[in-house]
Amino acid sequence: MPEFVVPAESRAESGKNANRRLRGKGLIPGILYGAKKETIAVAVSPKEIGTILKSASGENTLFDLDLGGQRRKVILKEFQREPLKGQLLHADFYEVALDKVLEVKVHVELTGLPVGVKAQGGVLDFVTRELVVECLPADIPEKIVLDVSHLELGKHLRVSEIKLSDKVRVLTGPDVVVAHVIVPRAEEAAPTPEAAAVAPEVAEPEVIKKGKAVAEGEAAAVEEKPEKPEKAEKKEKK
């Protein structure tokens, strides 16, 4: 695993205007904190953080934050991106102690073609893509790779079946389903020509399109009231 060192500088200003000026210099704001340690406002290069995020361990990468010549062993705790272009806007760093366990989320990767897909016509449903684990900083796994080739139709792979190193403890509930093979949704069958011929034809109501003037000004003329019986009789006598 490559060793990453990210240069950082402390910053005194904060707020939207200060952050905008900082980004104009090619830096982004960040926060360095740790258990029982003072919080420090820092500025770092988004390119350096982007390189770490693209590495094998991603956001779980353990690296050094070089603050004025003093290196701090940290992990990227949180980060924010611009929603449209995906540019990094902010990063939080958590200073770790190498002899104390951490609680982190690790990505899950599935491998193998399930029997239920290959021979039984099922579909693999990837339900849980991250697991919460607890371990020492140096033992954080890059990812958790699970073989699902044995899964038959209707069968599940649960957290309780996952075997990891003795140095890593899974905190996600044992009954949580990671993946399973399900029956594909049946497409609605199109009606046959015979069925279409037998089906009774339903007359469609006549639709009269009207403009605004008709809807407002001529509605009364369209809906005429029937004549009263007395008037009708008089007309017949005449």
Image (tube, grey):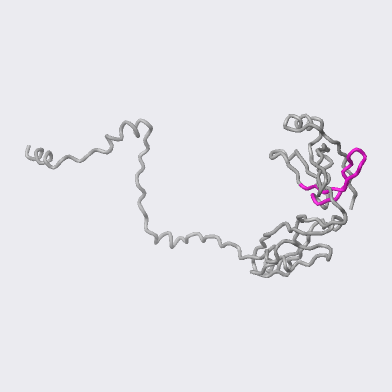
**Residue 72 in the image, given as x and y percentages of width and height:** 88, 45
Vertical position of residue 11 compared to residue 156: above or below: above
Q: In this rendering, would 8 be left or right of 92?
A: right
**Residue 228 in the image, given as x and y percentages of width and height:** 15, 40
Find residue 173 and report its image quarter.
Answer: bottom right
Front in this rendered view, residue 134 or 185? 134
Residue visible at 6% across and 39% down in the picture: 237
Q: In this rendering, would 18 be left or right of 62?
A: left
Find residue 184 and report its image quarter.
Answer: bottom right
Front in this rendered view, residue 22 or 198? 22
**Residue 132 in the image, given as x and y percentages of width and height:** 74, 58
**Where does the C terminus fall, quadrant-wise?**
top left
Q: Is residue 116 magenta?
A: no
Tally the marks. Answer: 0
Front in this rendered view, residue 217 or 121? 217
Task: Tell me which segment is drawn in magenta.
Answer: 59-77
Q: Main secondary structure of the magenta part?
A: strand
Q: In this rendering, would 234 be left or right of 137?
A: left
Q: In this rendering, would 69 be left or right of 89?
A: right
Residue visible at 64% across and 69% down in the picture: 154
View extreme (front): residue: 36
Q: Is residue 63 magenta?
A: yes
View extreme (left): residue: 237
Residue visible at 76% across and 30% down in the picture: 18
**Residue 157 in the image, given as x and y percentages of width and height:** 70, 67
